[in-house]
Image (spheres, rainbow, N blue to C red):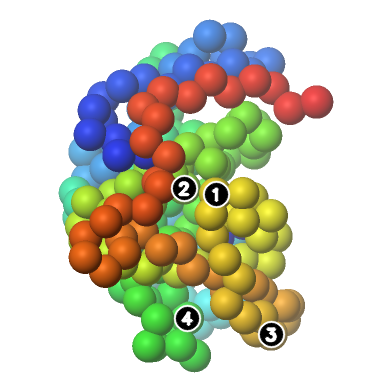
Amino acid sequence: MTRISHSAQNMPHVLRSTSMLDAVYRIEPLSRHSNLLKTIASWHWSEWGNADPDASLQNWVNGLRARSNPAGVPSTYVAVSEQDGSPIGSVCLVVEDMDTHPELSPWLANLFVAPSFRGLGIGTALTRHAMAKASETGVETLHLYTSTATSLYEGLGWRLLFREHREGEWSDVMAYTVRRPGGVVSGCGAQQTHAAAPSN
C-alpha cells in the first residue's frame, strides 16, 4: 500500500520546512541504517497494521528486515536527515503486495513520510528514487495500489489499471512502464537534487 537515475546516490536533497530550515536529506538503502529498522517498521505498523490483525510489530520488523536488501527487489530506501541522522521517510520495492493479484509484480509499496515533513515533496522524491532503482534492476513494469494518492502518481507518469475494494475501502491499482521492451528506459525523472518549499 502507498498513502531519480540516482547514479549519484550521495547527492543531498535540499529541504526547507518550518522545523528544519535549510536542512538536507539523503535517500539511501535501509541496509546502511540498520539502527533505523525498528523505527521504520513502527511507522508502517502504525499506518497499515490494522489490515494485518493477526500479525504483531515484531512480525513487521522481521518482514522489513527481509525487504532490506541494498538493491534490487525486495529493497527498502529511507530518507535520512543530514542534520541529525533521523529518518523522515521510506519506500519499498517488493515482489508481491496484493494477494489477489499474484500475476502482478513487482510493486512500489509502503511509501511513508513522517507527518511533520509532509507537503514538502519528500514522498515524490522517494517515489522517483524507487522508480529509478527499479529501472536499474531491469524491471519493465512497476505496480502500486493507493486509496489516497492517485493524482500524485498520475503526475509522475503512472496509469490506472483498475479499482478494487480492499481492506474496507476502494483502492486504485496503478502501473508504471519503467523499461520498455528492447531496453529503452522510459522517463524516470533523473534529477539528483530537489528543492522542497513548504506547502501553502
What amino acid does circle 1 point to?
Answer: Leu
Residue 127, labelled with which disc? 2
Q: CA distance from mark 3 to mark 2?
A: 24 Å
Q: Is residue 136 above or below residue 172?
A: above
Question: Are the residues flagged by discs 4 and 1 in contact, CB closer than 8 Å?
Answer: no
Of the two numbered discs 1 and 3 on the same chain, state the one appearing first in sequence.
1
- Residue that mark 1 sits on: 156
Q: Say which residue appears at 48% left-offset and 37% top-offset.
A: 125
Where in the figure is residue 166, as x and y percent of width and height?
64, 83
Do residues under tags 1 and 2 come within 8 Å of each other at their CB atoms? yes
Q: Amino acid at mark 2?
A: Thr
The residue mark sitting in front, 4 or 1, is 1
Q: Nearer the viewer, residue 199 or 153?
A: 153
Residue 150 position, x and y percent, is 66, 60
Distance of label 2 from label 4 (alpha carbons): 19 Å
Residue at x 61%, y 49% (from the top left corner): 155
Lateral position of residue 138 relative to residue 22, left or right: left
